[in-house]
Amino acid sequence: MTAARSAETCRLTVVGPDGRADVAVPISSTIAGLLPVLVRHTLRGQDSHEGSWVLQRLGEPPLDPDGTPETLDLLEGEQLYLRPAENPMPELDFDDIADGMATAVNRRPDRWQPEYSRWLFLSLSGITVLAMLLVLQVSLSGLASTISAGVLAGVFLGAAVAAGRKLDDLALTTAPGLAGCAFAAYAGLVGVGGMDGVLALEPMAVVIGALATTVAAGVLLTAKVFVSPRIPLVPFGVIAAVGVETMVGVWLGTGAGFTVPQAAGILSTGLFALMILSAKLAIRAARLRGPQLPRTAEELQVDLEPHPAEQVIERTGWADRYLSVLTVSSSAVFAVCFPYLLTAGGWLGPTLTGVFAAALLLRSRQFFGAWQRLAVTAAGVVGMVLVVVGVVSQMPQAWHGVTLVLLLGLVVSLVLAATRPPNRRLLPLWGHLADMSETLTAVAVLPILLQLLGFYAWARGLAG
């Protein structure tokens, strides 16, 4: 018996209650999908087809119905047994307790797999990079730390470019690039703010650190275009975008004359508008353009040529990556802006933060990429948590218990939502209510922001 199998099928011998059959099954088909076919081939009589069936190895529990011959590691020519689900074959007894223990341990789902070692060593390499940053912080002077961090940034960026050119390995290309961006940011912070500026986050030091990070990420993205096509776009695009957004935010708070809460509000509003337009911007950046609606009979004959499938799929992939860059970077900056927004006096801080958070949670429904939806949802949750904690801390003690009861009700509702079947559709009413709520929260942002900026007081002053 050998583990070698053809590219698409795996030959198996299936033994049923009424006979046996030699079958060639697709390696990508699930056991649940194969069972009806195997029942027809191994059972005689119409009544025998009724009921549920399982497939199992001799002496082992039934195979996972969601598994495939490939994931279950079925061998070419292996013999399996088809049994009624209510009467499977019992597992074999063990004469040797050590053999039984080894078999039980090997069947555990949390068993260490050889492929986990790769991610363990990559994680340890990331921890080592963090240790290098700590060594720079505690043992060297400002100038020495700046020079050392700059040299290390160049080394790691060069390693990322080389890996992106020679290796088809996403992790080994991304890891040194992230390390290079981290050292570039540290060099910028220390070079301007000194050793104490790293923790103090002085505005000018933050700007230079963000600029250095953006330049490092830009070098990798440029290398992707000309030298190393395997460098991933999304992580370094997010880093570059966050760097630019950080510089804009610091400029609003220092160079444009706005207070810190006002700068955070302006930046958050701009990013929210960008998020609303993100899908259209990503499609245009990927050069995807649908046919225009015809207005005359002659225009019905325009744009009829089919588009090459490979080109459409490739550009759609680029559009999805651009959308991920916009959503993830904006969500990260939102999470940083919310604490500064809450420092606005009176009701403005919690109200504007809560409106932003609610708008993000409602907007997350429009994103179908896993990282896109998770990032936007996480930013909204951070805002909501900050608002709840900030408001409750200012309330009388008696209201704390009421808040806990309300949060407990929210926990129960979320657990019930988690137990809901994933393929069960919501009533259209809920979708319409969510759309209306999203529109209301988006519209409410602007008048609250104008109050934060003092626009209404300025207008009243003009009127005398």
Image: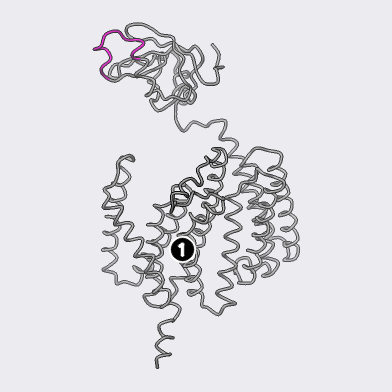
Q: Is residue 417 magenta?
A: no
Q: Which residue is mark 1?
A: 272
The residue at the point 55 percent across, 21 percent down is 7
In magenta stretch: residue 47: yes
Q: Position of residue 220 (x, y in %)?
A: 67, 51
Residue placed at 52% from the left, 78% from the top? 258
Q: Name, please, the residue furthest toward the front.
A: 298
Q: Nearer the viewer, residue 196 or 322?
A: 322
Taking 346 as reference, is 117 above or below it?
above
Front-lying residue, 132 or 18: 18
Q: Quadrant of the C terminus?
A: bottom left
Q: Quadrant of residue 136?
A: bottom right
User: Does the magenta stretch mainly form a helix, a strand or a loop?
Assistant: helix
Q: Quadrant of residue 2?
A: top right
Q: Which residues are magenta?
A: 39-51
- Residue 53 in picture, x, y percent from top left: 32, 19
Residue 116 against residue 392 in the figure, above or below: above
82 to the left or right of 281: left
Q: Residues within 10 Å of mark 1 (few under 14, many from 20)?
A: many
Foreground: 403 or 86? 86
Q: Is residue 325 above or below residue 13?
A: below
Residue in front for this viewpoint, 395 or 211 = 211
